[in-house]
Amino acid sequence: MAQAATFDMARTDNLAIYWGQGGQGEPDLIDVCNKKTYDTVILAFITTYAGNPGSLTYNFGNDCSQAEIDGCAKLGEAIQTCQKNGKLVTVSVGGADSSISLSSDEAAESFGETVYNLFLGGKDQSRPFGDGVILDGVDLDIEGGSTEHFPAFANHMWEYAKEQGDTKKYYLTGAPQCPFPDHVLNQAHFDAVYVQFYNNEEWPCGLLVDDPQYGWKTFNFATWNTWALNTSLNQGVKIYIGAPASAQAGKYYADAHTLAKVIKVAQKNYSSYGGVMMWDAAAAQVVGWEWRIGTIFFSHLQRLQNSYVRLAFFQFYGDKYGDGHEHRHGR
């Protein structure tokens, strides 16, 4: 069984990236898995469920879906490479175009068993990546429809795993919009929350701290930090800054200068801070975030081991953000 032996959720410089919805511009998953920059790769998405195992549908990139099942085996090989490289690989439920109907806790529990059997440590003849490929957890990105019964989905999934004698550590993450609260988060044990500080029309919480129209008042990380420390069922939960990787990937995009500033504030002031989530791999590749975001974290310079990247970073930013070592591993 593949294990993500080197992943450490306690760090404050983890980088999570969504992969699978970038269309023709999507980089190959194997290339993402071989990059030292990313710590977690989230496969997007499980898109449909209507109450029975046969109704579950998924769409991972251009080559892996129920209609293109042959391409899933290639993704399975890439996933194993990711895990051998010490990265988590999880599967995300939802997305903007999802249609997932959970009419009761019982239906949610059945959904949990189906996801476990298809993607985690279970058994099913329809496992898309093959029997030997076991993902590291599940992400909830519920952007349409009701969120009711999703806590039952998550909680039962882990109970079901234990009933099967499965001792692997699985991770549960969520990707709520930044307006607070998100009630699903209070009813399950989340390991990390990827707060989307973008695409919020009703209340524009986000990352535009240098914009006079918005400023720091829109960056409500303090509220999420308070929730993590006082309300979350897991008071060791990590909160990530969710950011679009390009202006085309999401509204309220923050450039490298602004994001670096926000990261430093979060690392210094909030003990729940865990890193950055980016949407998505295709956009990150186009605008060069693959090295920019790594260098923003400073400690990732050691992972990149590329003197040119180090030089490019300091030429790009100068010494504006200090030495960056003060809060590198702080909680």
Image (cartoon, helix red, strand yellow):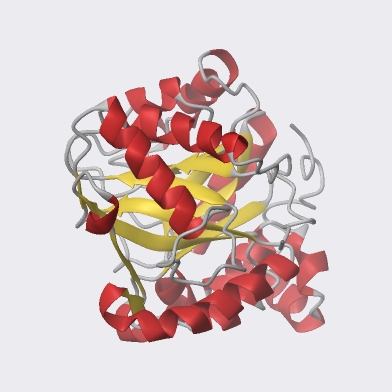
Q: Residue 141, relative to residue 278: is it above or below?
A: above
In which quadrant of the rendered image does the C terminus lie?
top right
In the rendered structure, the answer to whether residue 185 lies left or right of residue 213 reads: right
Q: Nearer the viewer, residue 2 or 253?
A: 2
The answer to which image quadrant residue 70 occupies is bottom left
Q: Can residue 261 be spotted in the picture?
A: yes
Q: Residue 308, relative to residue 261: is it above or below?
A: below
In the image, farthest residue toward the top: 230
Residue found at x 68% / y 52%: 321
Residue 130 spot, x, y in % from top left: 53, 72
Q: Can residue 190 be spotted in the picture?
A: no
Q: Nearer the viewer, residue 243 or 146?
A: 146
Residue found at x 22% / y 56%: 55
Q: Residue 88, relative to residue 266: is it above or below?
A: below
The answer to which image quadrant residue 22 occupies is bottom left
Residue 32 spot, x, y in % from top left: 57, 76
Q: How many numbered marks does the figure carry?
A: 0
Residue 157 spot, x, y in % from top left: 47, 38
Residue found at x 45% / y 77%: 287
Residue 239 spot, x, y in % from top left: 55, 36
In which quadrant of the rendered image does the N terminus lie?
bottom right
In the rendered structure, the answer to whether residue 178 lies left or right of residue 266 reads: left
